[in-house]
Image: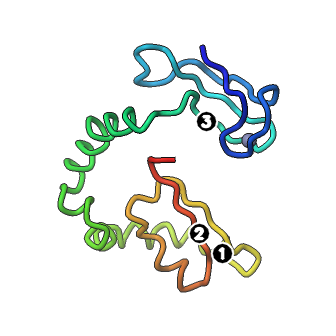
Amino acid sequence: MSLPNKCFLCKNKKNSQTLITNKVYGDAENKRSFFRCENCEIIYQFPKFTNKDQKKMYASEFENYMDKRVGKKIWQNPNLNSQHNIETKNRRLKYLKKYINKKYKNILELGAASGFMLEYFKKKNIIVMLLNHQF
Ligand SMILES: [Zn+2]
């Protein structure tokens, strides 16, 4: 089992990284584990996917899933995907609006798809960072 030298996010050192599990779905070779950084509390997979691994996984799993769910023409086009997700955006905003105020001016959105939530936040002068499948 490989051990991380530091947290990929906050760069804290090895002795603050705790093994959560070495059972990772789809890791047939049993090379990956999940760790928790005791400094920033993020839980992450290590070793992370290489670009080659990501392309393979997204092509074989995610893209097939999205093709069946909404169709290739929609999910691969940001404008069509935004239109397709209007109900999802409105449903999320009902929940999120109570957290959006003058105190918080930055949002980190993990798994942002086409970024269909961005327009609303942009109007509120909130800075949004998107983190999708290549980080
Ligand atoms: Zn950390």
- Secondary-structure class at tag 1: loop
Quadrant, the N terminus: top right
Q: Amino acid at mark 3?
A: Tyr
Are there few (<14), some (14-19), or many (20+) residues within 10 Å of tag 3?
some
Mark with earlier residue (3, 2): 3
Give the residue displayed 40% in from the left and 24% down from the top.
Answer: 26
- Which of the pair 23/51 is nearer the observer? 51
Give the residue displayed 61% in from the left and 18% down from the top.
Answer: 2
- Secondary-structure class at tag 3: strand
User: Eyeballing the image, is 128 above or below 46?
Assistant: below
Pinpoint residue 132: horizontal percent, then vertical percent: 47, 53
Pinpoint residue 3: horizontal percent, then vertical percent: 66, 21
- Whether residue 12 sits left or right of residue 47 in the image: it is right
- Cα distance between the residues tagged 2 and 1: 7 Å
Task: Tell me how many marks there are.
Answer: 3
- Cα distance between the residues tagged 3 and 1: 27 Å
- Cα distance between the residues tagged 3 and 2: 25 Å
User: Are discs 2 and 1 less than 8 Å apart at CB?
Assistant: yes
Q: Which residue is mark 3?
A: 44
Ligand 1 lies in quarter: top right
